[in-house]
């Protein structure tokens, strides 16, 4: 019972963040789901619920999508996803978490210190590739996309809509690749089904929160989430 309460709490908070910011579910949920499930199960539960959230939200915000950037992200991720599944199958999960935590913390510090980057087509492809790799490897595409958009001062509406549209592709493709090469289990699909009502509640609460967040608050909130996630992943990978 305690495990279910923790599981539903993680899903609720992560759903609220995903809905209000466009990126929070995988960043918030994946590290904590790894405490409750085997790595393969945690990643696949995250992928399934993230697909549900992205599909549920995209129809209401599709007018804010930057389709040119989205196209380049998708092309880039198509090269990254196969590489990610190789990492997942060959590397220790703690090595992956350590690498991701270091990347998140370094880049977040750069953003806090007002680091800025110009958006280019080549960088769009590169961010898509890195995101695809991380999705297939640990179910977490958010950090590279979020850091890139934050560094280019992208409006929160475009950030949320474009990332959600990208997630529909990258999560779905990664789930298929995961099932083919790493297989799946009954636990994954039952847990995901049980969590759907909690996700719906989070979607509603997150929409209310999104309307109250201005651009500056949104940016600070982004940094806090990234720092917290990076620190937690670092702690989890080193304590082993």
Image (cartoon, grey):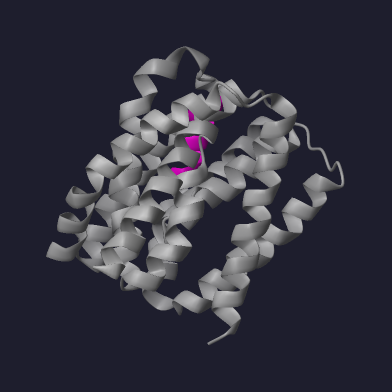
- The x, y position of residue 159, in whole percent, is 58, 28
Q: Quadrant of residue 126?
A: top right
Q: For the view shown, which residue lies furthest in the bottom direction?
A: 240
Direction from residue 156 to residue 85 in the image, left or right: left
Q: How many marks?
A: 0
Tell me if residue 73 is in the magenta stretch. Answer: yes
Magenta segment boundaries in residue numbering: 69-78
Pick whichever, 182 or 203, lies toward us: 203
**Which residue lies at the image location 33% right of the left edge and 64% below the top edge?**
42
- The x, y position of residue 9, in whole percent, is 38, 54
Q: For the view shown, which residue lies furthest in the top direction?
A: 63
Pick whichever, 13 or 183, lies toward us: 13
- Compared to 138, does 16 lie above or below? above
- The reply to whether residue 185 is in sight is no
Q: Quadrant of residue 190?
A: bottom left
Pick whichever, 88 or 122, lies toward us: 88
Pick whichever, 113 or 7, lies toward us: 7
- The x, y position of residue 165, in whole percent, is 42, 29
Direction from residue 79 to residue 3 in the image, left or right: left
Image quarter of the N terminus: bottom left
**Which residue lies at the image location 37% right of the left edge and 33% below the top edge?**
203
Tell me if residue 79 is in the magenta stretch. Answer: no
**Which residue lies at the image location 52% right of the left edge and 29% below the top edge?**
209
**Which residue lies at the image location 44% right of the left edge and 47% below the top edge?**
14
- The reply to whether residue 240 is in sight is yes
Does the magenta stretch mainly form a helix, a strand or a loop? helix
Direction from residue 185 to residue 97 in the image, left or right: right
């Amino acid at each position: 019972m305690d495990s279910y309460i923790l599981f539903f709490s993680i899903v609720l908070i992560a759903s609220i963040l995903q809905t209000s910011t466009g990126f929070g579910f995988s960043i918030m949920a994946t590290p904590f789901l790894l405490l409750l499930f085997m790595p393969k199960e945690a990643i696949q539960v995250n992928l399934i619920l993230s697909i549900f959230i992205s599909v549920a939200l995209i129809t209401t915000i599709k007018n804010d999508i930057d389709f040119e950037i989205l196209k380049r992200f998708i092309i880039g991720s198509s090269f990254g996803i196969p590489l990610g599944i190789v990492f997942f199958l060959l590397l220790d999960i703690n090595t992956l978490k350590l690498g991701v935590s270091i990347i998140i913390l370094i880049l977040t510090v750069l953003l806090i210190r007002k680091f800025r980057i110009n958006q280019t087509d080549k960088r769009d492809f590169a961010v898509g590739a890195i995101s695809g790799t991380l999705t297939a490897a640990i179910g977490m595409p958010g950090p590279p996309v979020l850091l890139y958009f934050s560094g280019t001062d992208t409006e929160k509406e475009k950030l949320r809509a474009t990332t959600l549209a990208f997630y529909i592709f990258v999560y779905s493709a990664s789930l298929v690749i995961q099932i083919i090469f790493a297989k799946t289990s009954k636990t994954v699909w039952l847990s995901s089904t049980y969590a759907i009502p909690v996700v719906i509640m989070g979607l509603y609460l997150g929409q209310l929160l999104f309307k109250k967040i201005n651009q500056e608050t949104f940016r600070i909130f982004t940094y806090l989430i990234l720092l917290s996630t990076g620190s937690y992943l670092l702690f989890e990978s080193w304590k082993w």
